[in-house]
Amino acid sequence: MKNFFGVIVSFSVAALLCACTDYAQKIEDEYGPEDSSGKDGVSGEMTDYRDGRTYRTVTLGGQEWMAENLNYNTPASLCFVYLEENCSSYGRLYGWPLDGICPDGWHVPSEAEWRTLFYYVGDNSGTKLKSTSGWKVGMSGSDDYGFSAMAAGAASYVDMETYRELNTDAKIDVLIKPTAYQNTDRCNEYHAWYDCGDFFVEIVNNESSAFNNLELHFYLGATPALEKPISLGEPQVSFGEQTVDENGECYLPIHIESSIPAGGRIVFQIKWPSATYADFINGWSLLEHKGEGAFVEFDGIDLSQAPYFTGDESQRNELNSQGYEVDSYTLDPYIPVYYNGARIAGYGPYYEPILFFSTGEFAAFWTSSAKIYPDSIYYADLSNESASIVEDASDGFLSVRCVKD
């Protein structure tokens, strides 16, 4: 049925378009720019007064569409790989449900409204509606109508096994060294290890571009009333107040104000005026994580080695409690890293795994139409030569184009 319908549509609209090679200019000439609103082929603009953002619009098939992806910030939306510049370029990716995300007077288009658009455009609807840039080689469109569908990619919640295999987190490593450096009067082999309290933290940027203004969430299992630590070392580091997250877990915000160049690293020390490891023994970031529910296998941070690690931040190999030379720094994947307010690496409590995919080759937009089952939603796929409507689960994040009421 779909193929048959597509053939009929292609034939009818192709015949129509042959007679109107420049329909937009015809409308403009006939009505003038001030009387062309709502006329097919005419472009305009609208302002979303919730945030002041202005969008180009285009009228096609009697429907006025946004000619740019929606970029209104909601709690259920995100930027591709959590980078704000991707929102600026491609708009935001939105999770279901979509209630109220379009401005007043506009709405998320239904499956039928998308089909009306495809019918109007006719043959090779995907190519004609796609932008001329931002696509992988050989996939760009002709953008005949100024609709400018962009290859913004998508994101989806996935199961743990898939996430481990395909995760697209930023390649930023956080390593922890429990240490007695400059604190051997309180932290030494003659005292209990839990009387120690200091750490060295190393952040390694394995990406191809620099990062600045990163923030770490160090889950120490402490209370919000815990005192602030101080930082020693060259990088500019500051600490926020102990913060309780949305799930009731407490973390120490660590603001990294120094820039970390591509392939570079920084190291700094965390010293507590009076707090000790006894305050941190239940910290998510320090505990062992293993088994089915673990994002990655992690033996935890062995705090009992602190009295034996007395060297400064540059001394990696030290003798442990058994007298063996070991690397004193441990890679800790359970300290989430944030950039521009979004998690880009590391895992906090209750984190749900999300994968990003297909930027440069996938342009998909939510419809407001669902099947009988609430987790089955239709979306419009404009990635290929011919646009199509696809049914899928509602656990993904896709672009949104709003259409006028």
Image (spheres, rainbow, N blue to C red):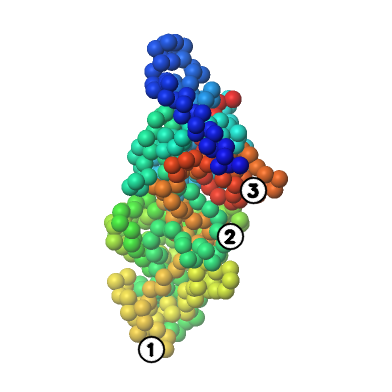
In x, y percent, where is residue 35?
46, 11
Q: Nearer the viewer, residue 56 or 377?
A: 377
- Give me the residue at 35% from left, 85% from top: 325
Q: Which residue is identified by label 2?
A: 350
Q: In the image, 97: left or right of 276?
A: right
Classify the position of the N terminus by image quarter.
Answer: top right
Q: In the image, 340: left or right of 222?
A: left
The answer for how far apart the CA atoms under marks 2 and 1 are is 38 Å
Between disc 2 and disc 1, the foreground one is: 2
Q: Nearer the viewer, residue 15 or 390?
A: 15
Between discs 2 and 1, the one toward the N terminus: 1
- Give me the residue at 37% from left, 77% from top: 328
The answer to whether marks 3 and 2 mark residues whose Cβ atoms lie closer than 8 Å is no
Q: Is residue 177 visible?
A: yes
- Give me the residue at 33% from left, 62% from top: 206
Q: Which residue is identified by label 3?
A: 376
Secondary structure category for the residue under label 1: loop
Q: Is residue 339 above or below residue 89?
A: below
In x, y percent, where is residue 106?
57, 28
Q: Nearer the viewer, residue 231 or 77?
A: 77
Q: Which residue is identified by label 1?
A: 323
Q: Is residue 105 above or below residue 282?
A: above
Between disc 3 and disc 2, the foreground one is: 3
Q: Amino acid at mark 3?
A: Ser
